[in-house]
Image (spheres, helix red, strand yellow):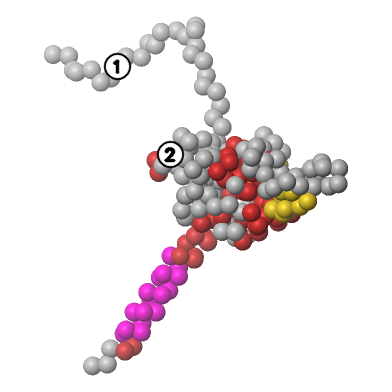
Amino acid sequence: MNHGPLVFLGLLVSVVCSWAAVVMVPQFQVGDQGMVRIEETGQDYPQAPAGLARRGAEVYRANGCQYCHTQQVRDAGEGQDLARGWGARRTVVRDYLRDQPAMIGTVRYGPDLTNHGIREHDRVKLLQRLYNPRWVMPGSPMPRYPYLFELRRVGPDGGSSLNALPLPEGEGPGAGLEVVPTPDAEALVAYLLSLRADPLFFEVFPPPAPKPATNAEPSTLTATNLPPSP
């Protein structure tokens, strides 16, 4: 007996079911989500990276930063992300609404960067970490990115440029030279400083619990679950 049509029908049903589970179900669940107004700040969330930070997102992706860093804070029952201070809440779908593409990441050789802009504010420290991570954290497995910087000769007066990178003592490139961040390095740092997903937009802020009454009269209700009288 020829079972070809039956096999074809079975494969077709399998493909359709898989497509529905992977594409249609998530679309029905989160496809209608949009920006939401944060009443506490009066701003819409999430906002797309703007200006230099938008260019920095491209540099982040081009250098494969998402292969060693995640942008996904897990719930308390799934890890220690909240205990480590990587965020005030777990990450939700809306956080990635303006990311094209969403760089969630899969491996954590380094810390999660979802709220890096909240934890780190020092631009110079971030630039130093990009040039040589071991200066900031000895033994760091993070690779160096020297190609994001330029070596320039110091001016005739012997003074460094305004945007020259401050280097630890004894770590300079040589006499008469200075290290200057490229526009890509500045853009990447701007992007890292812009990373924050802290609005509690999905939380319901409960009203304060009412204070117990101080002048309440004793209850006159009788208990109804007592055993019957003999």
- Badge 2, how many Cα within 10 Å: few under 14, some, many 20+? few
Foreground: 37 or 130? 130
What residue is shown with label 1? 223
- Which labelled disc corresponds to residue 80? 2
Q: Quadrant of residue 16?
A: bottom left
How far across and down, in percent of the image, does residue 203 sit?
Answer: 55, 38
How far across and down, in percent of the image, does residue 132 sit?
Answer: 60, 47
How far across and down, in percent of the image, does residue 62 sit?
Answer: 61, 61
How far separated are the C-alphas under marks 2 and 1? 47 Å
Three-letter amino acid code of the residue under disc 1: Ala
Q: Is residue 45 visible?
A: no
Disc 2 is placed on an element classified as: loop
Disc 1 is placed on an element classified as: loop
Q: Is residue 87 magenta?
A: no
Residue lying furthest bottom: 1
Figure disc tally: 2
Foreground: 18 or 47? 47
Of marks 2 and 1, which one's residue comes earlier in the chain? 2
Residue found 46% across the figure and 53% down from its top: 107
**Picture quarter with the N terminus:** bottom left
Task: Provide the residue span drawn in magenta.
Answer: 6-21
Residue found 41% across the figure and 69% down from its top: 18
